[in-house]
């Protein structure tokens, strides 16, 4: 009986370690994607109000919970509340980054996670998620016509982008060398931005959506040098996006950078100028919802001649193969809108998991050792073994935490139109807006299921 009490105490102690720490990491006996299934499906089907109702409290801590809250508020067109939630995420990230050393409570959490699962560790957001944090904060300022506030967020996002690139410089250069060895020449954007041309590897590290939006806002503010820097970077990431290429050429021409302009014209042709009666419509379109991490489990027996067989469950996160969701093409004034990809968020998320997988597997191996040590100390008979096996099965959960409500991809389109009232058809939704001759308007929209959130802002003369 005494041994069984010791066993129960050993199993419960990990939960106590977690409860003593001032954070929430989800349910001990489940994982994040499972807990947020209703939220995820509601966003994916375009039921934004239902998604708001599905949001849970204290599921994964201040950073990730507020990521989801902020994104859902934006989809529900409550931009003030969206910014409030994202500001709370931002504050929590700053507090996390300001910690010079690991605290005693974090050490306790880490020890507890080795005896249970990685969901007990404090959530540390991926670089691409931090980029989206500032992108969406920036968009809330654009919506409020606060261009300077938006540019502050763009600068902060760019700092994250640059640090991510520098951190992975060796990986990007290796990918570039491989491409060149296969006879592929670097794209113009990579040359102009002094970026390694690493194809999908660069696209997984750098967010073309963020870089393009940043450049567009700099251009609208009159900072052509800042705009040109980010257009070149966006072109390095999205080399086949004609909207990015034309914008890069437009600004290069205004700056008088003839050498760059010549290279761009040779690759992409010339910019179509606006006629005196025309206006420019720039569309940024988000589609779908990023893939959700799922869990893979495998039972692993360990044989002990003295204490019987112990069963350990290995649980790893993975992205299942899911086909891209298709959407009915948009039309502007009755003509189909042809868009080009800016960012593949699924690719970013998958790359982040690949980077983390070695450490995840290492922790799984350490967890088996830790649990076996606990079992040998506490399980002295068949009943003890049974209790421990049940405990292992219930508590071993994959760490599937990620920002679930992000879009799957982002596209852009640039159309020259006759000035006046414009009518945009997005599936079942119709949206109208006006634009004066010689001016540019930005239309931002996010599409999920048959629904869409959409708004526009005048950018003036670009």
Image (cartoon, rainbow, N blue to C red):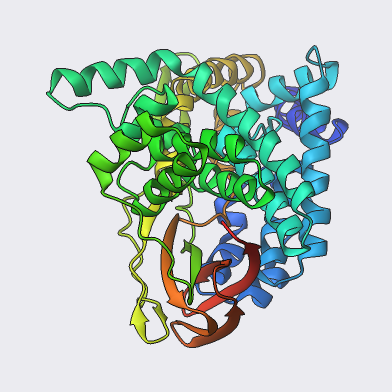
Q: Which quadrant would residue 89 be assigned to in this image?
A: top right
Q: Nearer the viewer, residue 375 or 166?
A: 166
Residue 43 visible in the snapshot: yes
- Reply above or below: 333 against 299: below
Q: Nearer the viewer, residue 314 or 459?
A: 459
Whether residue 387 is visible here, answered yes or no, is no
Report the quarter where the N terminus lies.
top right
Residue 69's place in the image compared with 317, above or below, is below
Q: Quadrant of the C terminus?
A: bottom right
Q: Position of residue 393 (x, y in %)?
A: 53, 39
143 sits left or right of 262 in the view: right
Which image quadrant is residue 159 in? top right
Picture coordinates of residue 15 (x, y %)? 76, 34
Q: Percent from the top left, x then y, of residue 320?
A: 36, 49
Instruction: Tell me what residue is drawn at x 42 percent, y 21 percent.
Output: 194
Q: Residue at x 44, y 66 (%)?
A: 274
Q: Nearer the viewer, residue 128 or 14?
A: 128
> Is 139 in front, or is 378?
139
Q: Pinpoint residue 221: horizontal percent, then vertical percent.
A: 69, 49
The extreme left residue here reads 183
The quarter of the picture where residue 384 lies is top right
Left or right of 152? Residue 32 is left
Q: Residue at x 44, y 76 (%)?
A: 417
């Amino acid at each position: 009986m005494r041994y069984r009490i010791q066993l129960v105490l050993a199993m419960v102690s990990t939960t106590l370690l977690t409860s003593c720490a001032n954070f929430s990491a989800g349910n001990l006996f489940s994982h994040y994607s499972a807990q947020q299934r209703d939220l995820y499906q509601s966003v994916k089907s375009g039921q934004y109000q239902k998604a708001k109702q599905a949001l849970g409290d204290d599921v994964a801590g201040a950073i990730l919970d507020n990521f989801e809250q902020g994104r859902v508020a934006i989809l529900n067109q409550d931009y003030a509340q969206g910014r409030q939630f994202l500001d709370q995420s931002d504050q929590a990230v700053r507090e996390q980054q300001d910690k010079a050393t690991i605290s005693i409570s974090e050490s306790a959490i880490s020890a507890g996670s080795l005896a249970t699962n990685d969901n007990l560790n404090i959530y540390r957001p991926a670089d691409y998620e931090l980029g989206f944090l500032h992108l969406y904060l920036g968009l809330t300022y654009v919506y409020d016509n606060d261009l300077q506030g938006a540019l502050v967020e763009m600068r902060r996002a760019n700092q994250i982008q640059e640090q991510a690139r520098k951190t992975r410089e060796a990986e990007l250069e290796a990918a570039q060398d491989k491409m060149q060895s296969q006879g592929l020449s670097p794209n113009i954007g990579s040359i102009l931005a002094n970026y390694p041309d690493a194809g999908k590897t660069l696209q997984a590290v750098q967010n073309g959506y963020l870089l393009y939006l940043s450049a567009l806002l700099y251009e609208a503010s009159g900072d052509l040098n800042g705009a040109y820097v980010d257009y070149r970077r966006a072109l390095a990431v999205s080399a086949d996006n004609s909207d990015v290429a034309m914008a890069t050429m437009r600004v290069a021409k205004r700056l008088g950078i003839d050498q760059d302009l010549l290279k761009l014209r040779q690759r992409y042709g010339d910019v179509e100028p606006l006629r005196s009666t025309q206006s420019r419509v720039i569309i940024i379109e988000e589609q779908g919802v990023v893939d959700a991490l799922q869990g893979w489990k495998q039972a692993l027996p360990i044989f002990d001649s003295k204490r019987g067989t112990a069963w350990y469950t290995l649980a790893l996160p993975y992205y299942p193969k899911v086909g891209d969701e298709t959407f009915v093409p948009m039309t502007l004034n009755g003509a189909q809108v042809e868009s080009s990809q800016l960012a593949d968020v699924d690719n970013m998320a998958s790359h982040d998991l690949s980077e983390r997988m070695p450490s995840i597997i290492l922790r799984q191996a350490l967890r088996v050792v830790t649990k076996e040590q606990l079992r040998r100390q506490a399980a002295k008979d068949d009943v003890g073994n049974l209790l421990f096996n049940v405990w292992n099965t219930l508590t071993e959960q994959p760490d599937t935490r990620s920002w679930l409500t992000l879009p799957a991809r982002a596209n852009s389109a640039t159309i020259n139109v006759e000035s006046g009232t414009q009518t945009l058809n997005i599936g079942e939704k119709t949206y109208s807006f006006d634009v004066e001759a010689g001016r540019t308007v930005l239309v931002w929209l996010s599409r999920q299921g048959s629904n869409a959130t959409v708004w526009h802002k005048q950018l003036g003369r670009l």
